[in-house]
Image (spheres, rainbow, N blue to C red):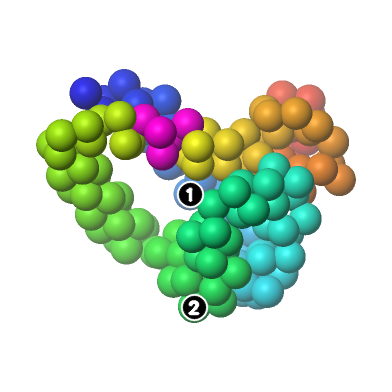
Amino acid sequence: GLGGMMGAMGGPAMAEQMQQTMESPMFQALLNNPETLRTILQSNPQVRSLMEGHPELAHALNDPEILRQAIETARNPELMREQMRTTDRAMSNIEAHPDGFNMLRRMYEDVQSPLMDAATGAGGDSSPAANPFASLLGAGAGAGAG
């Protein structure tokens, strides 16, 4: 079922790391400016490639209102939990659909996994210039960053 796929997406440890990252002063300054966040997203070649291949994702990442809502959700632990519950219910409903698991698998392979690779530098060029998110998500923590 979805348990294995959801575990691969990060699970509770990833949520804890995200919460710590979200509370950092540098990240808070970034969240206060959706335009800067959009510019950073577009500066990442992997994210840009995903946006070119998925117009609906490009629309979401270029819409300041959607970015503001995502930022507000990310800042508020209760909103984040509610969003996670809603997403979990939606994914369960999709999985119950004939061929639903394959639809979710394709979404993971085509969107979720490449976005995570882009955010962590796992998908290719992981230089700071190519991946402005690596330091925010702690990708360089093992190298003494922080």
Q: Residue at x 30, y 29 (%)?
A: 102
Q: Taking 36 as reference, is 17 left or right?
A: left
* Residue 116 against residue 2 in the figure, above or below: below
**Label 1: element kind:** helix
Q: Taking 104 as reference, is 25 left or right?
A: right
Where is residue 143 drawn, in percent x and y?
Answer: 78, 25
Q: Is residue 108 magenta?
A: yes
Mark 1 neighbour density, 10 Å: few (under 14) some (14–19) many (20 or more): some
The stretch of residues the image draws in magenta is 105-109
Can residue 63 be spotted in the picture?
A: yes
Q: Residue at x 82, y 43 (%)?
A: 130
Where is residue 3 drawn, in percent x and y?
Answer: 26, 25
* Residue 136 against residue 79 in the figure, above or below: above
In-front residue for pair 37/136: 37
Mark 2 neighbour density, 10 Å: few (under 14) some (14–19) many (20 or more): few
Calculate the distance from the C-alpha at mark 2 to the C-alpha at mark 1: 22 Å
Give the residue furthest to the bottom.
65
Where is residue 104 drawn, in percent x and y?
Answer: 32, 36
Disc assigned to residue 65? 2
Q: Write down the residue under mark 1.
A: 19
First reached walking from the N terminus: tag 2 or tag 1: 1
Disc assigned to residue 72? none
Where is residue 15 drawn, in percent x and y?
Answer: 43, 41
